[in-house]
Amino acid sequence: MSLSPHCRYRRNFHTIIHRMDSEQPNVEQAPAPSKPDGAAPTEPPSLLNARICDLGLTIEGSGVDRFVQQLYRELEDKRIMKFRPVCYLTDEWGCPSGEPTIGIPFYLARPDLAQIERENNDLEDTREIMKYLRHEAGHAFNYAYRLHRTPEWKQIFGPYRRPYRENYRPVLFSRDYVRYLPGWYAQKHPDEDFAETFAVWMTPRSNWRKKYRGWGAMAKLQYMDRIGRDLGNVDPLRKRGTPDITVQDMEMTIAEFYRHETEQMPLLDVNVDDDLTAVFPRIVRKNNAEPAQSFLERHRKTLIDQIASWTAMPRPLVRKLMESVAKRSAEMGLTVDKRKQPEQLSEFTVFITTMIMNHLARSKSFQA
């Protein structure tokens, strides 16, 4: 069974960026994912060596079950009474092509697995989990009622059979599309455009009528609002979908899963030493200095979230870039002036964002 290309957000990134340094994390060289500042890992080697299919993971009774139930409540609040997409655990967020079912990352099912993910990829928070669920529910709704086959859907969103490209160049700040997932994701394909529109329409208190007033995207939201009412009490043409890869099929170990991930993430080929020295100039009085590495680590998640959102660079690549910059800052002994931290945070944010945007402007396309 083929898999729709939209189904993988964070791990199926092709090589678009060259390496920034020669080192790359290697799970085989350590019994567990490393922590900042060389702290010892807490995950037992037995868990890292366990095959995912042997862990007995299920949604029912797990920590992710409450999010699925919340999604169902939100559907009910929208008076969508007959559509309840079946969810299953897999390697990443996804919705198989044409299948009204939702794949959820397996690591959300257990706290110890979530901790490993947190140390490797900055674990999704509650808000992010619901955003992914609503987006995938949009794909599932589209497939359940086969909306993409109708002339009206094609007229509003475009041909479903348009080639699905991993590389695309969005029109930044375009008002013809809603903005939901990072990276101007609605512009990637008509199917993504619909899923993003569905997610905005679904989100409680999104106030979409006011937020998107005067936008070209309003016609899409109005279509979604009308079709939601029309189909609210209609049985789906396809009630249940067929999942692709389930946790029962995943014979790799936890360590192999994360090693495969790091092998897919090359970095930006750029020398930042001179620029970093300008951003973090030498401080004469040591009592006013904080290591730049710890400063960047403290603000890491906020920086990654915002940079990935506004530049359209995939979040894992932004994270790896930040890790390399922080590491290089430590090697160079760079420090931050404790009295000027807000200014230096602002300057660093502008620097790293400009560097990424310059790279993306020179490349042939964006990826997300």
Image: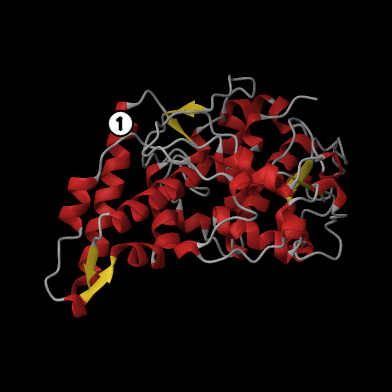
**Residue closest to the eye, 309 or 179:** 309
Q: Quadrant of residue 155?
A: top right
Q: Quick check: 220 left or right of 97?
A: left
199 relative position to 311: left or right: right
Say which of 69 and 330 sits in front: 330
**Residue at left 72%, top 66%?**
111
| Image quadrant in which the N terminus is located | top right
Residue found farthest to the front: 29
The residue that label 1 is drawn on is 361
For residue 178, side relative to residue 359 (left or right) = right
Q: How many marks?
A: 1
Does residue 93 appear anywhere in the picture? Answer: no
Determine whether 178 is above or below 346 in the image: above
> Looking at the picture, how far across and down is residue 259, in whole percent?
62, 42
Q: Do we see residue 202 in this rendering?
A: yes
Q: Secondary structure at mark 1?
A: helix
Q: How is the image coloured?
A: secondary structure
Q: Where residue 137 sits: x, y (%)?
A: 71, 47
Q: Residue at x 64, y 20 (%)?
A: 161
Name the spot of residue 142 as percent of width and height, x first: 72, 37
Q: Nearer the viewer, residue 254 or 166?
A: 254
- Where does residue 197 sit, x and y in percent of width and height? 58, 44
Amino acid on which the number 1 mark rests in the picture: Ala
Q: Most extreme residue toward the bottom, as rendered? A: 287
Closest to the observer, 348 or 239: 348
Rate crowding at label 1 as few (under 14), some (14 to 19) or many (20 or more) other CA atoms within 10 Å: few
